[in-house]
Image (cartoon, grey):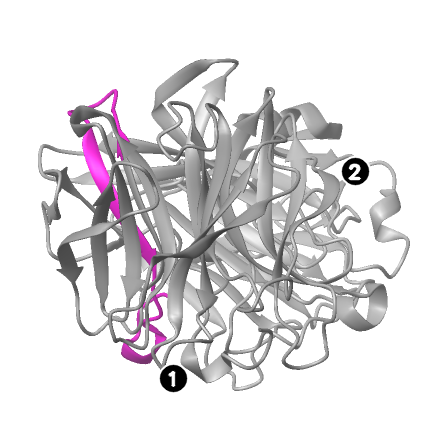
Amino acid sequence: MLQTSRRNLFRAAATGGAISLVGLPAAAQDATYRPVYHFSVPDHWKNDPQRPIYVDGKTYYYYLYNKDYPNLGTGTSWRLASSTDNVAFTDLGTAIPKETNPNGSIWSGCMVVDEQNTAGFGAGAIIAIATQEDRFATAPNRQAQFLFYSTDGGRTFARHEPAVLPNPGVVDFRDPKVVWDAARSQWVMALAENDKIGFYRSANLKSWTYTEGFIRGGMGVFECPDLFYLESATGPGRWVLGASANTKGSGGPATYAYWIGNWNGTTFVPDNPDPKWLDHGWDWYGAVTWERRTGAVLDPRTRYAIGWMNHWDYFGTTPSWDADGFNGTDSIVREIKLHWYSATEPVLLSTPVRTLSGRASRTVSLGDITVDGTVPLDYRGRAYEVRTRVTWNQLNNVGMQLRLSADGSRHADAGVYLAGGYAYLNRGYTGNPDSTGRWLESRTPFDSARKEATLRILVDNLSVEVFVDDGRYVHSSLVYAQPGDDRLALYTDGGAAVFNDVTVTEFAQI
């Protein structure tokens, strides 16, 4: 992912008042912006995730890293972290350094494990195909795909010469995503080419042949494409084509768009021409998905996903740089499933990775709370998960004030606006990265005739993620609350509601 515009940047109470929770979590006692249970770069800068692979039973997660941030024009390398549960990650340092070959920075791409030695570097060699700037080509058509290979389990890489997919004469030609098409015994590459996702095939990962393109205008420049197959417990299995896209200008999201359909070996045929979105917040970009495995056993109905929590509209505004010396954090890892609501309505559902519960340090169940107005909870925390099922008879608005200040003036709001027919996350009443004031509230459809909603909300030092109705809709956004804003309240407007089985869970620092 490297847009033209930034190419040179980085080479009142209804039940008797407050509801009490005992204790003050340590995370609320200092001024750090370091996330408690979300992945963040150790220092300086990160942006795009690279699709993880499995090595010796661990998840190996590579991402774009700039050790020279905030100096301009200094480029990115691939840094590596490993995990046994996809929650806590161990830093393993830089795996593919920048500026060690004539083409400089290493941009986005993907990893595969070449189990059958198709590329000739040995069975089980780890192959990375990534975009670099071909400095021997004529500007501006310099984005090309290069191959790197590792024979030491993905810790270090050598570069194969020359480019495995030279630029055919276009400006945008980047972010390769490679998958093994077992039914046809071929490697398949999806490549971002402006408003097209180009498809290529190969027998050896070194020589690629163009087959067809998937074109969708009006969505800006595609980045970080994705292609995978999922089985389903509620209907037939289907192929999914995804890509990061920015439709803010036309009133849409700027996250991960996807289409459900069929891959026929040369192109992707969607069931519906219009995209769906895996996230509707402002900060889930450059996302990748990968297989879920338990040991060597593949789960055919579930994939993991992770997204970069930032956006190029305001990438440099994070308070974590001044406070902690880093700029770059990710969403929680999710589990993605294909769910059929009807024979014509397949949707990808998102839920936080199930192993997150294993990191819980304290869980408090508050039971059922009736609210008609505002109920402040006697709770102090900046990093937690809150879950509830809300029920009502007649309402205009219902939700939670997150990261609430002591005087009540600052807060992020998440809930359901029945009068307007949508669920929302609003960061307009607290610190947020968008100085223009345009990207404050994200919205997703909600049937105004309904009488209940489930909310699962993840709050951390820099972010809020809202999962509505078992993950059918998700809102992931940066929220720059002040360190002392650590209160929580429930609210309704236009009637009463019951917040059923309210549970707050805190997590150990990862």
Crowd rating for badge 1 (residues with CA inside 10 Å; few <14, some 14–19, many 20+): few
Residue drawn at (35%, 30%), measured in percent from left and top?
Answer: 118
Name the N-terminal-most of marks 2 and 1.
2
- Which residue: 84% across, 51% down? 28
- Nearer-the-camera pick, 257 or 182: 182
**Distance from the alpha carbon under mark 2 to that under mark 1:** 61 Å
For the N terminus, the image quarter is bottom left
Q: Is residue 303 magenta?
A: no
Give the extent of the magenta segment: 229-253
Please report contact status of discs 2 and 1: CB closer than 8 Å, yes or no.
no
Crowdedness near tag 2: few (<14), some (14–19) or many (≥20) residues, C-alpha within 10 Å: some
**Label 1: which residue?**
139
Mark closer to the observer (2, 1): 1
Q: Position of residue 463 (x, y in %)?
A: 62, 57
Is residue 170 positioned above or below 42 on the image?
below
Q: Quadrant of residue 410?
A: bottom right
Q: Image quarter for residue 215?
A: bottom left
**SS at circle 1:** loop
Q: Is residue 247 magenta?
A: yes
Number of numbered callouts drawn: 2
| Viewer-closest of 60 and 375 | 60
The picture places residue 205, in percent across and down from the top left corner, at: 34, 42
Residue 184 screen position, x and y as percent: 16, 28
Three-letter residue code for mark 2: Leu
Q: Residue at x 63, y 31 (%)?
A: 152
- Decide if residue 278 is on the left or right side of residue 25: left
Identity of the amino acid at label 1? Answer: Ala
Label 2, on which residue? 21
